[in-house]
Image: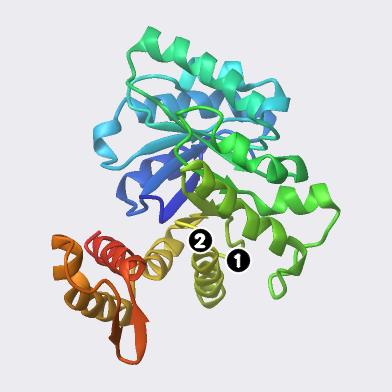
């Protein structure tokens, strides 16, 4: 489940320790944007120490490496690919070849350290990345999701960020979950930068849900619960789903009877039954 993926600065030992108490679906220790160049080595060691205490976190632990173009990924992987790690977020991925190369490196280290299978989440943050999303998402069986990185995308496109008007990145934001879905993996939306603006966060997360995102990347513990609420079905959705299942359940389960019926003035059929079952499954967590 990827309703929330929280980035935790890898060089900040206090934040890394606090992550043990967070209720985010995924904790992602960061080696990239939140870590200055002179603290990369410290961050790697801090993260490695945390991974050695994997059982204390009680949720999947990912690490965001530096970007493929940085040249730092081999050094990152050498330290953080160890028992305790569940996956890697790879920032600024432009094409499938980058993921294939990283997957090969991970496979070697994975075998050496007997870590178990490590997942990859490519981050789409450029025009090239957007148009290559389908290929990136399907580049290797390790890819478990893709994530949208809006701020680097805007920089690449020479566009300004406007929290009140997403026109500039609407196309990219809409395309990514479609391409990810076509490749068989979920998409995770970009961060909401204003950590004290819960109303804005909630609206932004709701917009992402409507576009087909499975969740949202976040940067502050206070954002966890509001985003979880958005990505859980509402009571109205659950009530409707139960009615659909009741109306069509017998016919669907037995393969007999009417597979299209009228419910409260709306025609429902097999696809609505599947949607209803998915809603009820999501509501159960």
Residue 181 horizontal/vertical position (percent): 50, 49
Q: Residue at x 53, y 70 (%)?
A: 201
**Above or below, comparing residue 240 to residue 251 in the picture:** below
Q: Evaluate if marks 1 and 2 touch, with contact meaning CB atoms under 8 Å apart.
A: no
**Above or below, comparing residue 164 to residue 19 in the picture:** below
The residue nearer to you, when weighing 247 against 84, is 247
Quarter holding the C terminus? bottom left
**Above or below, comparing residue 26 to residue 245 in the picture:** above
Helix or strand or loop: what does disc 2 sit on? loop
Residue 155 horizontal/vertical position (percent): 80, 50
State left or right for residue 273 relative to residue 79. Answer: left
Residue 66 horizontal/vertical position (percent): 62, 30
| Residue at the spot of label 1 | 194
Residue 100 shows up from this direction: yes
Q: Which dot, 1 or 2, sits closer to the camera?
A: 2
Q: Residue at x 63, y 42 (%)?
A: 133
State left or right for residue 8 relative to residue 170. Answer: left
Residue 34 shows up from this direction: no
Q: Residue at x 49, y 73 (%)?
A: 202
| Residue at the spot of label 2 | 212
Q: Quadrant of residue 84?
A: top left
Q: Which residue reaches farthest bottom?
A: 265
Q: Residues within 10 Å of mark 1 (few under 14, many from 20)?
A: few
How was this image coloured? rainbow
The residue nearer to you, when weighing 14 against 201, is 201
């Amino acid at each position: 489940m990827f309703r929330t993926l929280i980035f935790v600065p890898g060089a900040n030992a206090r934040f890394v320790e606090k992550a043990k108490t967070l209720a985010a679906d995924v904790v992602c220790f960061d080696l990239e944007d939140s870590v200055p160049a002179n603290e990369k080595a410290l961050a790697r060691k801090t993260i490695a120490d945390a991974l050695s205490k994997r059982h204390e976190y009680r949720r999947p632990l990912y690490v965001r490496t530096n970007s493929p173009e940085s040249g730092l990924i081999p050094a990152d992987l050498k330290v953080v690919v160890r028992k305790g790690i569940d996956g890697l977020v790879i920032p600024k991925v432009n094409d499938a070849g980058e993921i294939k190369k990283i997957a090969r490196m991970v496979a070697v280290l994975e075998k050496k350290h007997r870590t178990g299978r490590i997942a990859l989440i490519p981050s789409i943050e450029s025009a090239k990345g957007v148009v290559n999303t389908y290929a990136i998402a399907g580049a290797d069986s390790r890819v478990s999701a893709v994530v949208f990185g809006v701020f680097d995308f805007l920089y690449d496109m020479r566009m300004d960020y406007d929290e009140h008007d997403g026109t500039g990145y609407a196309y990219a934001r809409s395309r990514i979950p479609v391409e990810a879905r076509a490749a068989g993996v979920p998409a995770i939306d970009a961060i909401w930068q204003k950590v004290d603006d819960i109303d804005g966060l909630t609206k932004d997360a709701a917009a992402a849900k409507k576009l087909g995102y499975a969740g949202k990347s976040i940067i502050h513990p206070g954002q966890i619960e509001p985003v979880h609420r958005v990505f859980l079905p509402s009571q109205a959705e659950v009530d409707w789903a139960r009615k659909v299942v009741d109306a069509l359940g017998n016919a669907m389960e037995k393969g007999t009877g009417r597979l299209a019926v009228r419910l409260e003035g709306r025609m429902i059929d097999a696809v609505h039954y599947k949607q209803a079952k998915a809603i009820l499954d999501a509501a159960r967590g």
